[in-house]
Image (cartoon, rainbow, N blue to C red):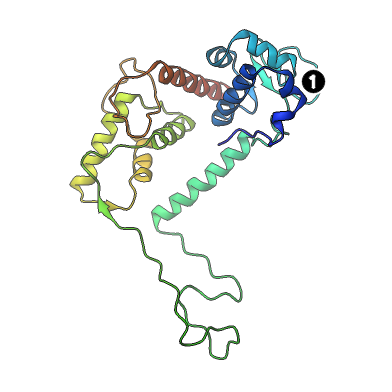
Amino acid sequence: MYFAVDDGAHSHPKIMQATNAAIGLWVRVGSYVAQHLTDGHVPGVVAKAYGTPSQARKLVEVELWHAHGHTCPRCPQPRPGDYFMHDYRESGNLARADVKERRAKDAEKKRRQRAGSSTPPPPPPGQMPFDEEPPPGDEDAPPEDAPRPPRRTAPAMAGIPAGWEPSRDDVHAANTARTDAGRDPLTANQVDAVTRKFVRRMTEERRVAAEWGGRWRQWAETERPDQPQQGGVVVHLPAGRAAGGPVSTADKRAAEAFALAARLRAERNA
């Protein structure tokens, strides 16, 4: 997901009136709102974690944010202590319902592909399938001595490396899917345990693949970790960092924000 910022925002009157620090908070929280599908609602605890009270007040003052009790007729009323991003949908950001519908369609497509029931669509009218000879007498057919286009080659398939680890995007995608399905997201220790089990199973079954991130995400979305959480925090690991490494303060704050979004979604769906 993304948070939409217009290319003319740098000279917009509201942006000009706000401080650079307040605009930094606006952009950072905007990406949080887009990632966690809050439809423009800003939890107060997230605003406090990412900025200062004076920066939040400045955003309310220039009407980039609305506090509880605002009079804007186009924007919903946030709860006391929370905020709402003015004209969130009208600024080009996707609604939660649209994103959920798109994800459901993608999940159904993947399910059919895994079941082997999907078939390639037919070529458009007048267009020949790849590498098929043109019919005799076709005026647009290339000369017989014309070089043929190179054939498509499939990515090389190989077994999983012994020290393979998921990327940050893999961990985030798996935790998002688990949260949407009502499951607890994985802690750093659980990511490590799930990955070891995944690598061991793929090695024992002599599985091969061109890319292992997608298979790991499918595994982690429904896997029940062998190791309990033991009070750990949910983190999104940077690519290349060991899954059991130390957790920084920034990672903990991001984990708390992620857990808060999961709770808010559960409350809205209740």
State left or right for residue 241 relative to residue 169: left
Q: Position of residue 195 (x, y in %)?
A: 28, 35
Q: Position of residue 165 (x, y in %)?
A: 29, 37
Q: Which residue ends up furthest to the left in the rendered image?
A: 204
Say which quadrant the N terminus sits in.
Answer: top right
Q: Is residue 119 above or below residue 61?
A: below
In this rendered view, identify the residue nearer to me: 210 or 179. Answer: 210
Q: Is residue 249 visible?
A: yes
User: Label 1 crowding class (10 Å Cα cut-off): few <14, some 14-19, many 20+?
Assistant: few
Instruction: Identify the residue at image location x=57%, y=28%.
Output: 31
Q: Position of residue 219 (x, y in %)?
A: 34, 40
Say which quadrant the C terminus sits in.
Answer: top right
In this rendered view, identify the residue nearer to me: 195 or 223. Answer: 195
Instruction: Identify the residue at image location x=64%, y=14%.
Output: 82
Numbered circles on residues, count: 1
State left or right for residue 121 relative to residue 18: left
Amino acid type of the residue tagged 1 in the rendering: Cys
Quadrant position of residue 7? top right
Q: Is residue 81 visible?
A: no
Does dot 1 land on a helix, a strand or a loop? loop
Instruction: Identify the residue at image location x=30%, y=27%.
Output: 190
Quadrant position of residue 50? top right
Q: Is residue 262 above or below residue 231?
A: below
Q: Which residue ends up furthest to the bottom in the rendered image?
A: 137
Instruction: Identify the residue at image location x=29%, y=56%.
Output: 157
The residue that label 1 is drawn on is: 72
